[in-house]
Amino acid sequence: MSKGVAPVILWLLVSVNVALGCECSNSTPIQQTSAQYRDRAVFTAHVIQLVGRTYDFKNEPRRMSSSAFAVVKQRYWGLPWYWPKIVLLDGAYPCEIAMAEGEDYLVSGQRVRYGVLAVNLCSRTQPLKGAEIDLRTLDGSRCAGPGGTLIGGVLVGRDPYRNPRIPDMLLTLRDQDGNEHSTRSDATGTYELQHLPAGDYTLDSRFSQSEYLSSQDLSVAEGTCLERHVLVRTYDFSGRAAPGLEGDAEIKLMQSDDSTEIRSDSLEPDGRFYFSSVPDGEYLLMAKSWIAGATNNFYYPGTFDPKKAAHIKVVNHKPTNIAELDFDLHTWQLVPLLVAPDPPNSSGRYSWRVQLINSDYVNNEKPWTPGEKAIRLYAARDASYKVVLYGYSNRPTDYGNCVSDPASITAEPGLIVHVKIPASCQ
């Protein structure tokens, strides 16, 4: 180590403070065209020495720490030429990360002071060997408008760094108008869909008689890449409820004597639910929602009376007396509402959510992506609500949150609610 570098490291050691922090996630890959990363320093680095408290994790043979010295390798943007070759990566509190000695990293850091970068707070600083998606989106050219980009891995299991990815997998997404957008994962098991109009998309989940594709929150923002992984999972049998219910209801099998309840492995955004490894027995299939006014259990094929429900006999993990378990939802209490913000775009100063308020409580809410034509929410049929747009300030020290005037409604099928963004928040 050179004499010029040693004093820098000694000075940087003075204020290292490792503390346990919170958990968070950041699904926006690093892209130079995004305001989220424009003011950060992005480069690759090799960790040479851990600093402070170290951790031993079960699946990681090397020691790890939330702070480490690293040698700068390739500079992309934001790291001044006059900074030292060795920098301190501080990933401690809040929302800390852990780094391994001897590992190469793609770094997205906030410059704190000379030679020190904060890489906590969901910065997407990550091992270089697992940063394929961020390396693709780095210059922002794949994320440019019109529309936005969905990109991610098709995985067996949940961990994109350790679990295998599946190449040549066909994915079909549907927009809010029912139009199809299809793509295949490439040789690395990564899929990409560019220039999708802003809004929510739904993945066709049923892939085969034994496998399905699991995904959540396939939302698209204008001029931005968003990372959304797709998980390949196995199942024994499935059925269908209503699309978009995954946050508002659950599907269960209940034994006829009420002694056992088995929750579905998944309720996907396209409305399909999946079961696996169900013990032999006789069951009732039940949908249950926690939305105010729709709390009664709803039984297959479509009744609130368990005495009128169909009995499902399961042998060797599969129903033997019923082929398809699709609910008849015509008499269910839940109905979809469409909320259309006006104007459909915003200043970018707020993160917006549509809220359904009943008896002064937020009973249901979903995020709104600027440019999205409408947001679908579920409500109880004939129940009274207030609908508001709530904008969370992206810079709380400069300006506060923003709330629209409420729209009073009575929930009924086919209702479209128009909510105006206050002029002061546009």
Image: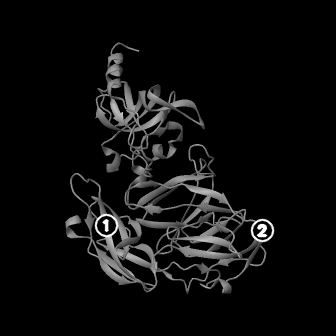
Residue 258 higher or lower than 43, as above or below: below
**Callout 2 amino acid:** Asp
Visible in this render: residue 344? no
User: Which tag, 1 or 2, sits closer to the chain's start?
Assistant: 2
Way the structure is coloured: one colour
The residue indicated by pointer 1 is 390
Please tell me which residue lies in front, 11 or 167.
11
Q: Position of residue 81 (x, y in %)?
A: 30, 28
Q: Residue at x 38, y 34 (%)?
A: 90
Give the quadrant of the N terminus: top left
Snapshot quadrant of residue 97: top left
**Secondary element at image label 1:** strand
Please tell me which residue lies in front, 218 or 137.
218
Q: Position of residue 302 (x, y in %)?
A: 61, 84
Q: Position of residue 40 (x, y in %)?
A: 33, 41
The residue indicated by pointer 2 is 280
**Callout 1 amino acid:** Tyr
Q: Residue at x 49, y 54 (%)?
A: 151
Snapshot quadrant of residue 43: top left
- Circle 1: is it few (<14), some (14-19), or many (20+) Cα within 10 Å? many
Q: Residue at x 30, y 43 (%)?
A: 39
Residue 195 higher or lower than 66, as above or below: below
Give the quadrant of the C terminus: bottom left
Q: Which mark is residue 19?
A: none
Q: Judge left or right: residue 375 versus residue 187.
A: left
- Circle 2: is it few (<14), some (14-19), or many (20+) Cα within 10 Å? few
